[in-house]
Amino acid sequence: MANGVAAEAAAPLPATRRRSTRRRFVRRKSWIAFLMALPLIALIGALVVYPAFYSLYLAMLNKGMEHFVGLGNFSFLFRRDLFWMVVKQSVIFAVSAVIFKALIGFVVAHFVHNIPAKGQRKWRGMLLVPWVIPPAMSTLAWFWLFDPSYSAFNWVLSRIGLHGVPWLGDPLWARFSVILVNVWYGAPFFLIMYLAALKSVPEQLYEAAAIDGANWWQKIWYVTLPMMRNIIAITVLFSLIVTFANFDIVRILTNGGPIDQTHVFATWAFQLGIEGGDLPLGACVSLFMFPILGVAAYFILRDINRRGNEA
Amino acid sequence: MSRRPFTRRRFLATTAAASAAVIGAPYIRTSHAAGRLAIGFWDHWVPGANDTLTAICQEWAKKEAVDLKIDYITSQGNKIMMTATAESQAQSGHDVLQMLAWYPQSLAKSLEPVDDVMSGLIKQNGKTAPAVEYLGKAGGHWLGVPAVTGTQVKPPCARIDLLKQHCGIDVQAMYPAGKPPTKESDNWNWDNFVVAAEKAFKAGNPFGLGLGQTTDSVDWVGALFASYGAQFADAKGNVTVKSDAMKQVLEYAQRLVKALPPDVFAWDDASNNRYLISGQGSLIFNPPSAWAVAKRDNIKVAEQCWTFEMPKGPKGRFAPFLPFFLGTWKFSKNKSAAKSLLAHLNQRPNVEKLVNASGGYDIPSFESMRNFKVWEEVAPPKGTVYHYPPRDTQQVWMAGFPAPANIAQQMYVQAINTKMIARCTQGGESIDKAIAWAASELEGYART
């Protein structure tokens, strides 16, 4: 019996049967989907997964990269005051920038939404400009506006009789400046996402609310915000990840100074790893973004999932 | 018209015939018989300097029958640093790469020793500055050959008129063109420097000395600390920051900072140049790049610029030094050609051509080569950079010396010296607290 099955399997399939097997294979959508996604999966594997594991490996080597030290680099960092200062600054930078970007994006999205459809495209295009310019270029322009000696802002202040501000020379003003530039750059992303969400809120809901006597604020609180909750959560999560990992703005404006008071994870990791020749410690610092963002992503996505199930 | 089909049999016959022809053909020496060589040089900011370097290299390549490929890599955004780190990690890239001061040490495992090249060059040209040996050697072996292009010192570049008018200092009398410094230069010390800085500040033309975290700031502060004998760590890596000399130099810095523009803590390497060129600043510490740009953009300022020696401290006169090196990787497939080119580039006539092409900006690391005509001739005013190359009693100094390179490199890139000054001035901390902070940082840098 077994021999008979083996002989059958080994025998060449007739042409009609081969065709139907191929058709069955093609009909299996999951396989086709997998094959079509394979190039992208390979790309993510090469450019995201491999570097991530490689940096994990690097973070467990000694400074000279000669032997394995396990979690030694991590425990070393925990003992450094500067590390905790960078954690604090990264959180302040990312959280405050995301809050302001979300608020500005929300308000401006409402303004744009209320512009008559005819002129809206122009405004949408203009408001997206900060997000479209490569941040390294626009930050250089900001650097010139904040320039320690020839700040354009200070020139304006002096024209109206006020003292100049040490935008990048004083720790507090320097923090303010890097957050300001990040908000300027990132707010259009929130604007466009919120505008899309606003357009998808059914007009009937506002009409029903108006019939019930709802005022402007109540419409926002009871109609707009609940309808936009998911898009707000996703946008905040996405922006939090990007802002936490920000490098170019801090690097160009302050390079982490003065007295390290504007360093974030990425700039400090670069300084330690590439400039300082301590790649394992640099990799270790950059990996600290992962658990912080992982926790944030878990809570935000869990919330979205719950609401999806409720719906 | 029928076409003969390209069958499998015909394909085999054709490839077999072609292979036989290749194997049987005699070896013909091509114009690139000595192989290929890829080189990555620092992209010089002086227009035309790269062309001279290319011409010297191509002339050598033609003579040696090497197929040479040159890339000029900018130091903007630290691209040249990242290239060195990436090539060392990937074990692939150029055969020869120009690298900044600390890199021969930090990438020592990937670099081919060049003792043979250096012993020949030292025999020919005499000794190099101690700072060059400190940076270029690891484990008793030379790992980089000093590069001419980009190597620089950062002495004072001051306004002749403003120093005379506000501070009563005649810099040309102290440092005359084409002649050694006069007796008056003995009074050019840090004590008189701070008095002059205060006078210039009062007159509205302050000295523009950066205290940020970039190389210009770290380098001049390194020289200031050296002239007071203030060290962070000794050659064995022992932390020596808690010393009277350190307290003394920080007290000095507290006085000096009051006479500087308030935003110097945010200055980068371009800020001091702009400060001088604008006409506001009366003195900066810089190579002649600021003067060269002033010559192009503000000739009236350029005509009043004079470059001369650093002020003297209790322990001597030190010039802030930042060298480049040329290293060849262990993975290079053409090390013999690479070494031949490295030796060729350090021949005196070639060094002179390179220094001339940079308008005197580049400083040869061999002390015997600091007497080229270019430094006498460059103008306006004639002789403005005659005292730019360190000679006489001035030693070149690399911030971080004499600490072992693994500690010193971190000290340098983390700008520990300028941050200490910032802490006990702008940050409002006491000197003792700033020193304690530095000691704790140094213990971290010493990790192996």
Image (spheres, rainbow, N blue to C red):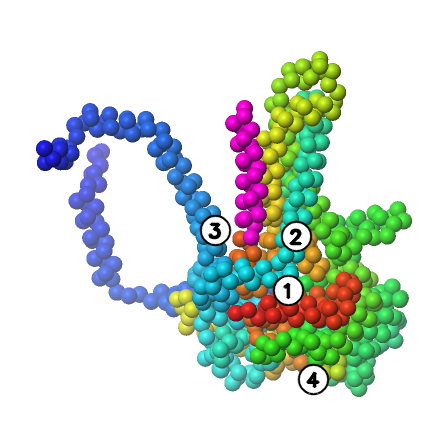
Q: Chain of mark 1?
A: B
Q: Which residue is mark 1?
A: B414
Disc 3 crowd rating (10 Å Cα; few below 14, some 14-19, many 20+) is: some
In the rendered image, residue B112, in percent from the top left (x then y), is placed at 45, 72
Q: Secondary structure at mark 1?
A: loop
**What segment carries the magenta color?**
A288-311
> Mark 3 belongs to which amino acid?
Ala
Q: Give the Cα distance between marks 1 and 4.
A: 32 Å
Q: Chain of mark 3?
A: A
The reply to whether the magenta stretch includes residue A300 is yes
Image quarter of residue B330: bottom left
The reply to whether the magenta stretch includes residue A163 is no
In the rendered image, residue A59, in percent from the top left (x then y), is placed at 50, 59
Q: Which residue is mark 3?
A: A52
Mark 3 touches mark 4? (CB < 8 Å): no
In the rendered image, residue B58, in percent from the top left (x then y), is placed at 49, 66
On the same chain, marks 3 and 4? The answer is no
Disc 1 crowd rating (10 Å Cα; few below 14, some 14-19, many 20+) is: many
> Mark 2 belongs to which amino acid?
Lys
**Residue B71 seen from this side:** no
Mark 4 touches mark 2? (CB < 8 Å): no
> Mark 1 belongs to which amino acid?
Gln
Q: Secondary structure at mark 2?
A: helix
Q: Secondary structure at mark 4?
A: loop
* B83 up-or-down from B151: above or below: above
Q: Give the Cα distance between marks 2 and 1.
A: 19 Å
